[in-house]
Image (cartoon, grey):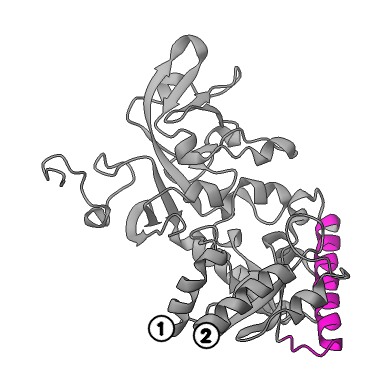
């Protein structure tokens, strides 16, 4: 079944050089300020260079594909085409499963063991008894090439000193794991650490070969609260349109609900709560000195409630007005969009394909 072209929306690619307030541009839309993006990437590269490690951009923010055991056939296929894909696992059981696959399919798959440096989520503790058995279980083409970690607890830090401590704990933990494996006779080429906060605040990365970070490309309100960036550094935002007003409740209704912004309320547990997102003009600058936030969302609607003492009134938000919303967490916010739109000076510069899902 095909869609009648008379009813089809214009292709985004055909709207290149279109202004953000052009009604032909559909909303909600995830837009990325290309100048801020480039600045953020250079900053991350410079930080890694200063620390003497390679910078491996983590693509989760703008694209993430989970690789699990049922994906091994696809991993093997992509490697046969020349892609240098490595997988991550954290148990002898998983290592045996990968080894059995490699033996059966007569293929090679490089493996990084995930190390848990802070009890944040999955992985083997650096001093854990499971580390060496997991490495020893890799055989028949399943090849240990390194160790990897992510200091997730760095996201909970409240001060720079706390982030610096988290960065050192991350470094010390992953290096300990690598040293234990090497002492047991294993080759460990890659010692991979990283999160955006630890990349930005680490003082020393001796023993680490690379730092990974993802949200540092776009940043978000959570990261600004952590101190990893300023609000002005945030490159990604959701372009939305005013579609209604509730005068008696001092509310303005936008066409961006939790499907467009995500339900992430990470800033609620931080010093500065941005509700469901910070409301900005089309120039990306926060309205009314940053006092206007989305106070609620439904599936398709965003709710902006004007503070009692706000210098703005509902008349400042006529139906059809375009606004940009800075997200609490860029990763889940960007995830649903079929395209990501690069903008320069308030106009569409390029439309990027955006792969979604896990297929």
- The residues bearing labels 1 and 2 have C-alpha atoms spaced at a distance of 13 Å
* Residue found 82% across the figure and 51% down from its top: 159
Between disc 1 and disc 2, the foreground one is 2
| Residue identifier under label 1 | 81
Marks 1,2: beta carbons within 8 A: no
| Residue identifier under label 2 | 107
Horizontal relation, residue 261 to residue 231: left or right: left
- Secondary structure under the numbered disc 2 in the rendered image: loop
- Secondary structure under the numbered disc 1 in the rendered image: loop
Magenta stretch prevailing secondary structure: helix
Q: Please determine whether, in this image, residue 113 is positioned above or below residue 286.
A: below
Q: Residue 130 falls in which quadrant of the image?
A: bottom right
- Callout 1: 10 Å neighbours few (<14), some, many (20+)? few
Give coordinates of residue 330: x percent, y percent: 55, 50
Give coordinates of residue 356: x percent, y percent: 43, 55
Does the magenta portion include 178?
A: yes
Give coordinates of residue 295: x percent, y percent: 57, 27
Q: Please determine whether, in this image, residue 251 is positioned above or below residue 110.
A: above
* Residue found 64% across the figure and 75% down from its top: 46
Q: Is residue 182 visible?
A: yes
Q: Please determine whether, in this image, residue 302 is positioned above or below residue 107.
A: above
Horizontal relation, residue 172 to residue 16: left or right: right
Does the magenta portion include 283?
A: no
- Callout 2: 10 Å neighbours few (<14), some, many (20+)? some
Comes first in the chain, label 1 or label 2: 1
Pick whichever, 306 or 331, lies toward us.
331
Q: Is residue 203 visible?
A: no
Image quadrant holding the C terminus, namely: bottom left
| Start-end of magenta stretch | 162-188
């Amino acid at each position: 079944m095909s869609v009648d072209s008379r009813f089809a929306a214009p292709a985004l690619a055909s709207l290149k050089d279109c202004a953000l307030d052009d009604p032909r541009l559909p909303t909600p839309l995830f837009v990325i300020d290309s100048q801020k993006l480039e600045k953020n990437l250079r900053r991350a590269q410079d930080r890694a260079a200063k620390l003497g490690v390679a910078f491996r951009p983590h693509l989760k923010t703008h694209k993430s594909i989970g690789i699990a055991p049922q994906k091994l056939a696809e991993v093997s296929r992509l490697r046969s085409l020349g892609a240098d894909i490595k997988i991550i696992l954290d148990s002898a059981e998983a290592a045996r499963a990968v080894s059995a696959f490699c033996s059966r399919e007569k293929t090679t798959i490089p493996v990084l063991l995930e190390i848990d440096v802070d009890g944040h989520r999955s992985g083997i503790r650096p001093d854990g008894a499971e580390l060496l058995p997991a490495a020893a279980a890799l055989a028949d083409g399943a090849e240990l090439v390194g160790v990897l970690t992510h200091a997730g607890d760095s996201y909970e830090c409240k001060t720079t000193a706390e982030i610096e401590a988290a960065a050192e704990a991350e470094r010390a933990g992953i290096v300990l794991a690598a040293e234990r494996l090497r002492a047991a006779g294993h080759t460990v080429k890659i010692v991979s650490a990283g999160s955006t906060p630890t990349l930005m605040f680490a003082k020393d990365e001796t023993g680490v070969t690379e730092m990974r970070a993802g949200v540092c490309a776009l940043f978000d309100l959570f990261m600004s609260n952590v101190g990893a960036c300023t609000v002005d550094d945030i490159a990604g935002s959701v372009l939305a349109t005013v579609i209604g007003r509730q005068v008696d409740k001092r509310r303005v209704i936008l066409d961006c609900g939790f499907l467009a912004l995500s339900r992430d309320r990470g800033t609620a547990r931080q010093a500065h709560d941005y509700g469901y997102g910070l409301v900005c003009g089309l120039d990306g600058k926060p309205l009314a000195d940053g006092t206007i936030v989305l106070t609620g969302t439904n599936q398709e609607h965003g709710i902006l409630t004007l503070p009692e003492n706000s210098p703005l009134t509902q008349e400042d938000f006529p139906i059809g007005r375009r606004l940009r919303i800075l997200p609490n967490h860029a990763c889940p916010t960007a995830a649903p969009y079929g395209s990501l739109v690069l903008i320069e000076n308030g106009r569409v510069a390029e439309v990027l394909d955006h792969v979604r899902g896990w297929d």
